[in-house]
Amino acid sequence: MNKKDPIIQIEHVYKYFGPFLALEDINLQVDKQERIVIIGPSGSGKSTLLRTINQLEKVSSGRIVVDGEEVTDPDVDMNKVRMGLGMVFQNFNLFPHKTVLENLILAPIKLKGMDKNEAEEIAYSLLEKVGIKDKAHNYPKQLSGGQQQRVAIARALAMNPKIMLFDEPTSALDPEMIGEVLDVMTNLAKEGMTMIVVSHEMGFAREVADRVVFMDSGKILEVGTPEHFFTNPSHPRTKKFLSQIL
Amino acid sequence: MEEKQRAEVRIEVTDGAAIPTEKDRGLLSAWRIAFFGSIALVIGLCIYKPHPYLDILEFVPDGIRVTFEVTIISIILSFFVGMLTGLGRISKNRGINLIASTYIEVIRGIPLLVQLFYIYYAVGSFTRIPPFFAAILAMTICYGAYMGEVFRAGIESIDPGQTEAAMSLGFNKRQTMFYVILPQAMRTILPPVGNEFIALLKDTSLVSIIAVADLLRRGREYATSTFNYFETFTMVALIYLIITLLLSKFVSIMEKKMTPYE
Ligand SMILES: Nc1ncnc2c1ncn2[C@@H]1O[C@H](COP(=O)(O)OP(=O)(O)O)[C@@H](O)[C@H]1O
Ligand SMILES: [Mg+2]
């Protein structure tokens, strides 16, 4: 693993919603195979930051480079970049009119021109990996929240992305289902996936994260190892926040 | 924490016959009374007074066929016009958006009968348009506008998270619309489309005015040649009623079949 091999560079990013400044001078570099966990109070801009990386949200100014492509350049082929950038949402956002299997094969077939058999083979092996192969022919609504989120992870992985973005993947789940989703994510991290995860699951952060990023009011206030955050966070806001959630 | 379950979206019914559902017992029995009552009435009249009632029944089937032809061709065409218009209405392109919105605004502000006259007589004074085509053209243009609003509402009822999920996988806007949004919107759209279908069928009676030999026109022909106005229009009204009731039943069955994603 080459530690100084940036796959994402975020430089001086600002994001306004009307007059409201949601991101203020964000600078962050993520190396290949690095696992970043972003924490911070609600409304601090965590989702917005994550969404600027795959350009679901356009930046107001600044520059973001993902795997050599400058995604903030209006001329970039963003659809192609997004194929290499998986995203998992808080509310799963599975396609309700398609079965689990169809959810997984739609993008590989339509976007990569993969043939159906090959796509299904990959889909089945991914479903096995996330532990719900037996649900392949069910519709999302027939699954529990934890199962749906695991399908959503498998759907993103079906495009064989280099980077995975997770936006509070467990915060819409019943407590007893959080573990099964975190396990899938932990395994993914062990396989060397580059991951940026917005989450307040501190056990997960401690086990998996290389670095933790603390955001507040649209700014990155502190970046450090999980140990640093749990033992002696430097910023008073960080201390206050951690004391609230731990 | 609880999972948010999206409320089922229903688009408000604007026109057309009330569609009976299981939940609405009152309406269901009203449907039964109207349907079986009108059938009994037709049969009773034909037995009681075969002349002219049975004669009328034998005279109008050609007209029923034409009514159905106009209805089905127009509904299919207006479905596609409506889809394009609906997509135009939600388009970020200002020009396309303006064209679609203006089309809807203009068409909805002019009575269908006037539109029909306009196409058949006004435009017809430059180029001759066969009545059947004029009828279908007018119905399509008119109902395309209404259907455009149905499509827009259906598309806008889909969770924006669906678009985000599709885009995050690498689908462009057009692919997202056709693979993800429209298939889901179809379900919300089906009941109002069914209503438009029924409303359109009734409105086709207007085309009898421009010499299309539909059900009403055939009735008028019979009535004027025999002077049996009361009997003829009683039968014509009953036939329209029976067809409309059958269609509304059909739509409600389709709707029930479409509901679950399970
Ligand atoms: N589309 C939007 N329009 C206006 N304001 C928004 C929009 N999206 C997010 N915001 C605002 O930006 C801030 C940051 O939001 P978000 O990134 O979702 O925070 P977090 O994920 O940390 O809870 C919030 O104050 C939110 O209200
Ligand atoms: Mg958020």
Image (cartoon, coloured by chain):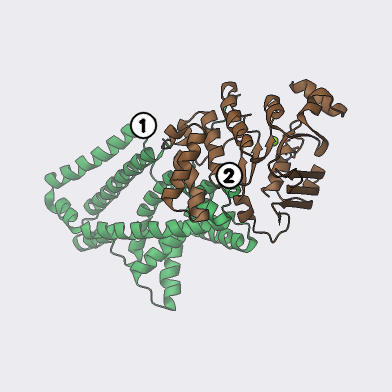
Determine the colour of chain A.
brown
Would you say B72 lies left or right of B51 here?
right
Which chain does green denote in the image? B
Which element type, helix, strand or loop, lies under badge 2? Answer: helix
A78 up-or-down from A140: above or below: below
**Residue B37 x, y percent position in the rendering:** 24, 38
Residue at the location (53% across, 52% down)?
B177
Question: Which amino acid does the dot numbered 2 rest on?
Answer: Ala
Image quadrant assignment for residue A150: top right
Which element type, helix, strand or loop, lies under badge 1? Answer: loop
* Chain under callout 1: B
Give B237 or A239, whichever is nearer the viewer: A239
B237 up-or-down from B4: above or below: below
Report how far apart the C-alphas of labels 2 and 1 lie in the structure: 35 Å
Question: Which amino acid does the dot numbered 1 rest on?
Answer: Glu
Residue with the mark numbered 1: B22
Give B109 or B139, whichever is nearer the viewer: B139
Residue with the mark numbered 2: B165
Q: In this rendering, does residue B204 appear at all?
A: yes
Residue at the location (56% across, 60% down)?
B100
Mark 2 vs 1, N-terminal side: 1
| Image region (quadrant) for ligand 2 | top right
